[in-house]
Image (tube, rainbow, N blue to C red):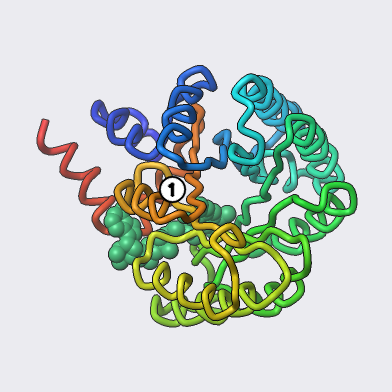
Amino acid sequence: MRRVVSAAPVTKPVVNRFIAGESVEETVPVIESMAGRGLEVTLDVLGEDITDPTEALAARDAYLRLIEALAPLELGVRAEMSVKLSSFGQALPGGHDLALKNVTAVVEAAAEIGTTVTLDMEDHTTIDSTLAIHGELRERFPQTGAVVQSYLFRTEEDCRALAEAGSRVRLVKGAYKEPASVAYQDKREVDRAYVRCLRILMNGGGYPMVGSHDPRLIAITQNLALRAGRKLDEYEFQMLYGIREAEQDRLAAEGHRMRVYIAYGTDWYGYFMRRLAERPANLAFFLRSLVSR
Ligand code: FDA
């Protein structure tokens, strides 16, 4: 699949719908244009599932270059980073310490330009390690964000533990293929769990980051925030680059904090395939582009 998709002559324009560029130089103008539209961003340098510690160092260095490029823009927390610990060596032998060391360098550099990092959540086997690293980072950098996925049975409990003063928690439905032993398989169950988690986060002491394009969940968020007595700057919406852009602008115009997740880099395969898999329309868009040449 990787070879076929990567070699398809039309793939690049299709990939570009979801990915801002291949380099930091191509991505900076996109960040500036988002800022001009009143949108905040979180930046993901693409890469995951590496096999060698030198690749982990390369991933760390790519984030350090990004932070250097962000410094003159002076966006502070309006441009934060999203990091996948698998790209920092989490799955290698001694991976917990390796990933912690690499991500700490990024979190320190981010703090120097007045911004922060959120640890993306990957498949369920990585969660305990990721939450442990998140806890360790928060001792020095309490703003470090975590992600929770409503499709997992464990997540309500994780939300309760994370919903404390000063925490930043992104709630998403979850994008990995997970077995029925750990995750809801029915979309309606996942949505219902999302609302239960949202309620815990909104009524807790932390800062909820609502990562979804789902109009129903966006309306429910506004309602729950109002009932929890939260002001517009006491939670935020997050959506992916290239998805529901008019809705992103609408929420920002209403005075909401709206953050766009921007992925860039050359290692786009895994990210792109998850976007295709989560929505038939995305897959149809890709297939149409293959036949309409
Ligand atoms: P879902 O895909 O169920 O769609 C619900 C509804 O939203 C649709 O019926 C439609 O109305 C609307 N919609 C969705 N896509 C649309 C489109 N392209 N155009 C128009 N309408 C559309 N996952 C993970 O496992 N770990 C992580 O760390 C992250 N991080 C992350 C950050 C951010 C900012 C976001 C937004 C998402 C993630 N995800 C993630 C991905 C997440 O788990 C999930 O796969 C996607 O967000 C898709 O789920 P939705 O909540 O958008 O709803």
Image point (54%, 80%), residue name:
227
Going by the picture, which residue comes out furthest to the right? Answer: 139
Q: Position of residue 44 (x, y in %)?
A: 57, 38
Q: Mark 1: few, some, or many residues within 10 Å (few <14, many ≥20)?
A: many
Q: What secondary structure is marked by label 1?
A: strand
Quadrant of residue 124 in the image?
Answer: bottom right
- Asked whether residue 198 appears in the rendered view, the answer is yes
**Ligand 1 closer than 8 Å to label 1 CB:** yes
Instruction: Judge by depth and name the residue closer to the eye, 282 or 65.
Output: 65
In the rendered view, does 54 fall on the left or right side of 151?
Answer: right
Residue lying at 21% horizontally and 51% vertically, measured from the top left: 284
Q: Name above or below for residue 204 compared with residue 124.
A: below
Give the percent coordinates (x, y) of residue 42.
Answer: 56, 42
Residue 65 lies in what quarter of the image? top right
Query: Residue 97: x, y in percent?
Result: 86, 45
Question: Quick one: quadrant of the C terminus?
Answer: top left
Q: Is residue 240 toward the left or the right of residue 50 in the image?
A: left
Q: Quadrant of the N terminus?
A: top left
Residue 4 can be seen in this image: no
Indicate the amino acid at tag 1.
Leu
Q: Is residue 203 left or right of residue 41?
A: right
Q: Nearer the viewer, residue 189 or 106?
A: 106
Task: Determine the residue located farthest toward the left in the rendered image.
Answer: 292
Q: What residue does disc 1 label? A: 240
Q: Residue at x 48, y 56 (%)?
A: 256
Image label count: 1
Quadrant observed for ligand 1 in the rendered image: bottom left
Q: Position of residue 193 (x, y in %)?
A: 52, 80
Q: Is residue 106 depicted above or below 160 in this figure?
A: above
Relative vertical location of residue 173 with respect to residue 65 in this rendering, above or below = below
